[in-house]
Image (cartoon, helix red, strand yellow):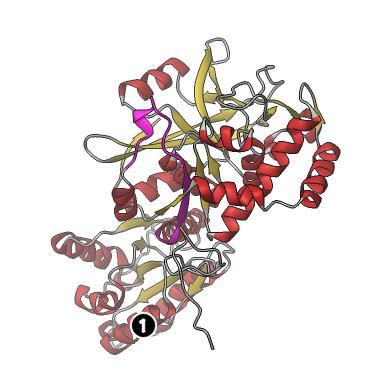
Amino acid sequence: MVKKIIESYQVGRSEIFGDILSKHPPKRKPKVGLLAYGYFEYWRMFENLEKEVEADMNRIAGYMAESNKYELVYPGFIDTMDKADEAGENLREADIDLIVLTEGTYFPDYMCIQSIRHVEHVPLVLYIPQSFSKIRLDIRYRDIVESSGFVGLCQLAGSFAKMGWERNVVMGPIDDQSVYKEIEEYAQVCGVIRRLKNLKVGAYGHPFRGMFDIEYDKTKLLGNIGPETIYIEERQLAQALANVKEEDVNNLFAETKRRFRIEDVSDITINKGCRTAIALRKLVEDFRLDVLSLLSQYNIQLLADDTGGYGSSLLIENGFMVSCEGDVATLVMMDVLYQFAGISPMYGEYTLYDLEKNAFVFSHHGDGDPNLAESMDKVVLTSCPETWGCREALAFEFTMRPGRATICGIIDDAIGQKMLIGSGESLGGEPFHIHSPQVFFRPDIPVLTFLKSIVESGFRHHAVIALGDYKNHLIKLAKMLNIRTMTL
């Protein structure tokens, strides 16, 4: 038997490479471990207190179990050192992404730490509960003991501070549903962090020359945030283009003509856009990529006689984020917002502002998910406004539909990574005839203040806008990743 030779992805012709994982990590919901404590010493002092406190802690577990955003791991009520140790072991074995730690009574810090030692690398939220929201005039000392978790958790936070252990805090009555919404946000953030640690970024080409602001250090990106960069070579794209089957091109061509209103572009250009789209999809599949950064000027246009914008749009439409001009860092934020929102965000640049509407136009040259428009009737597939090596290419023209929206970006400046986090509103409306996807974005602050702050803070000229309000998610993410923020 001839032994199969394993090669690098840069030279290999097989589907298995020695330097790329053969499988994606399995997709799963974030796992949240709940540690809920009550102090055994109080049970002999106050009749029925143990049952009441345990019922309170189980009620918290019940509310958390109702979430469809994460999977709850609850090892049960803890009131002794042995149970604390066993609970920590259970959470370690479950491979949890987040710990929620709460107390019904005061509980000694060393016993909580016994649990945490098993999973001390996992992000932690201290939930300070109370079994009532209003203090009654007939309150007894026993009632204070039953809701004295505040004392223990405040003490625990101080202990963590002395040890340099990170913690986040949620506070509110047990029946306050906003508490569980915030826990959901933390769970989603931890799920995104897990994804970032496994994210494979395919980078075809370099950052566009003349855009120093989007240059990045792939080692710092890997070390501080998590994604690994895999360089895709010209030869590999050329091979993918050469292997495209005419039948597949014809099928995608027919589907394209059926799906979209087409203006100002030839069938020959549509055919080339379909060929590139199929080749890009094959590269993504072959190299097990999670996201793709393209230098959409020069090289790809000379090689494919196409910008790759249509292929990028189809990938984005199917939940696979693609950026252009070689911007890897903004691509990562694009994927982050997609994970939070579940719908594709828009990648682009700040262009013009409108003082009457307190808004600015956010746009780019051609690629974006057409499903962001109010309807497909308002989407046009047309010619790309910029050609840097090809004669003509495809571009979408539409406006993002109205709704609350979040804008974010990230830059690696002289100090380190810094994240832009802003909120506002997508205004919708008819698109300008500029052969590009567009967002009419009204920030929650005066538009000139917003835009001036971007420039004064030195943020890059690229950003991402997603429908929905994910400002709090991003603030939590930045804190957990130890990234500075500018919040607008």
215 in the magenta segment: yes
Q: Quadrant of residue 215?
A: top left
Question: Within the image, what quadrant is residue 356 found in?
Answer: top right
Q: Residue at x 42, y 66 (%)?
A: 19
Q: Is residue 123 magenta?
A: no
Q: Which image quarter holds the C terminus?
A: top left
Residue displayed at 77% across by 46% down: 249
Asked which secondary structure carries label 1, the reply is helix
Amino acid type, mark 1: Ala
Above/below status of 206 relative to 193: above
The image quadrant where one finds the N terminus is bottom right
Up-down relation of residue 420 to residue 143 (above or below)? above
Q: Looking at the picture, how far across and down is residue 69, in whole percent? A: 55, 61
- What crowding class fits label 1: few (fewer than 14 Cα within 10 Å), some (14-19), or many (20 or more)? many
Residue 396 point in image, percent of width and height: 69, 30
Q: Relative to the observer, which residue lies in front, 187 or 347? A: 347
Magenta segment range? 197-216
Asked if residue 313 lies left or right of residue 339, the reply is right
Q: Residue placed at 40% from the left, 77% from the top?
A: 53
Name the residue that disc number 1 marks.
Answer: 87
